[in-house]
Image: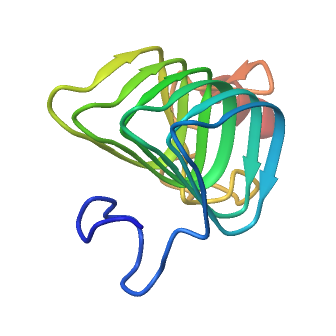
């Protein structure tokens, strides 16, 4: 069970549904919909519609996609948190990050790149003030050239 304030993305009253203890080692594809805490070893791929907590002693070799992820252990692989990623002081991440919200504590080891996902859908049109600025390319034509061609 997670201690209060240890995993700040867990809402009051939420609990960890499943725990893979430090004596557990697992290989393969892991899919789940609620919450999972891994304290042991895992190698493969993790896909979730819920919350994932990587415990302090965990060693993970996997690409991960989940709604929210908290990393206190070691992860080697790319991580995508569709809502939120938190790296605790003991966390080590060797891979790329893709998330909407990122919280990184002092002492974290991170080697990779980070892409912050927009909260606005990419299919929504941009507002007129930011569309077609001078010098910006639209379909291979610079904005000022596009304006001249349109007139």
What residue is shown at x 77% (from left), y 32% (from top)?
Answer: 45
- Expressed as whole percent of the image width and height from the top left, the position of residue 62 reads 68, 25
Q: Is residue 64 left or right of residue 136?
A: right
Residue 151 visible in this rendered orientation of the protein: no
x 52%, y 44%: residue? 99
Q: Quadrant of the C terminus?
A: top right
User: Which color scheme is applied?
Assistant: rainbow
- Residue drawn at (36%, 19%) of the image: 110
Quadrant for the N terminus, please.
Answer: bottom left
Left or right placement of residue 119 versus residue 106 in this view: right
Residue pushed farthest left? 106
- Classify 50 as above or below 71: below
Residue 109 image position (x, y, % from top left): 30, 19
* Residue 127 visible in the shown view: yes
- Front-most of residues 87 and 97: 87
Image: 10 above or below 28: below
* Along the line of sight, the residue nearer the viewer: 60 or 23: 23
Residue at image point 36% right, 37% down:
56
Can you tell which quarter of the image residue 64 is in?
A: top right
Percent position of residue 78, x then y: 62, 25
Q: Is residue 91 left or right of residue 83?
A: left
Image check: 24 left or right of 7?
right
């Amino acid at each position: 069970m997670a201690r209060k304030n240890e995993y700040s993305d867990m809402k009051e009253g939420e609990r960890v549904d499943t725990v893979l203890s430090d004596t557990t080692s697992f290989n393969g594809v892991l899919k789940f919909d609620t919450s999972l805490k891994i304290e042991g070893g895992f190698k493969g791929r993790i896909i979730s519609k819920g919350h994932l907590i990587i415990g302090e002693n965990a060693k993970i070799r996997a690409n991960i996609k989940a709604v929210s992820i908290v990393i206190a252990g070691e992860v080697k692989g790319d991580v995508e948190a569709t809502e939120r990623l938190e790296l605790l002081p003991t966390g080590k991440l060797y891979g790329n990050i893709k998330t909407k919200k990122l919280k990184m504590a002092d002492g974290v080891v991170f080697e990779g790149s980070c892409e912050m996902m927009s909260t606005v859908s990419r299919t929504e049109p941009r507002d007129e003030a930011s569309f077609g600025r001078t010098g910006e390319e639209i379909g291979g034509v610079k904005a000022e050239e596009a304006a001249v061609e349109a007139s």
